[in-house]
Image (cartoon, rainbow, N blue to C red):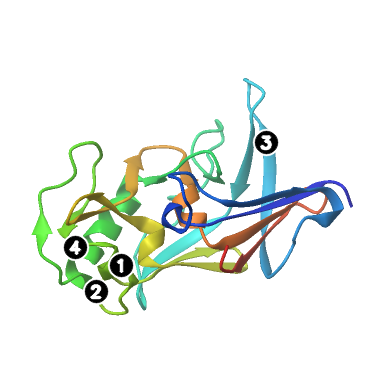
Amino acid sequence: MGWQFSYCFAPPDNQNSSGYGGEFIFGRDAKLHGDYTPMIANRNEFGSVYYYLTLIGISVGDEQLLIPPGTFDQKSDGTGGVIIDSGVKLTILHYSALDLLTKSLKNAITLEHVADGSDMAALCYKGSKKNLEADTDVPNLTFHFSNLDIVLHPMNYFDEEASGVICLTMVPKRDLSIFGIMAQQNKNIGYDLENQRLYVSHVDC
């Protein structure tokens, strides 16, 4: 029962510093709660361990995006696929999926659009974190993994980049997609390495 760990990170604004507060638990006390999705741990040539998940699709509100099958599959040469990573702030998506997601968000969000962020390929609007906490200004996203749906509230994928400007915290890439730490905040994430399962439950960290 020792081959497991869990963590739960709160949004930075819930803390007295700019870092993510919460907990990190190793061993038999790790919290394996909620539903789970299959997970495969692979070690790359540099010795780093990547935890691969099977991402089936993404929904904006109640609308599932028409992402072509195979977009998130790992290729025979080892490229591509989707990993979960607690060391990466942003979520990184295959460029074609992010393009569809961005177009859908533009249709769904009624806030005033402003120029994209200067430091990342972001979709930006006039607004604040209060808009992200509202029920109507920005829709939830749902990431449909194998056997597990993870709902992202606006605070999980938008951030206040400057005073009065909120921006999408997802960036494109052509190969490996990464489910980053902002998307994981206020969720208990439990890794069962022995049974190759990732558990996710929505909590207030």
What x and y, as percent, mark residue 114? 10, 54
The label number, if any, that marks residue 127 in the structure image: 4
Disc 1 and disc 3 in contact, CB within 8 angstroms: no
Determine which residue is flagged by label 3: 42
According to the image, label 1 marks what residue?
A: 132
Circles 2 and 3: CB atoms closer than 8 Å:
no
Decide which of tag 2 and tag 3 comes sooner along the chain: 3
Q: CA distance from mark 1 to mark 3?
A: 36 Å
Q: Left or right of 167: which side holds 13?
A: right
Q: Quadrant of the C terminus?
A: bottom right
Mark 3: amino acid: Asn
Question: In which image quadrant can residue 202 be found?
Answer: bottom right
> Three-letter amino acid code at disc 1?
Leu
Give the residue at mark 2: 137
Q: Are marks 4 and 1 in contact (CB under 8 Å)?
A: yes
Confirm or deny contact between disc 2 and disc 1 (CB under 8 A): yes
Q: Are marks 4 and 2 in contact (CB under 8 Å)?
A: yes
Q: Is residue 190 above or below residue 107?
A: above
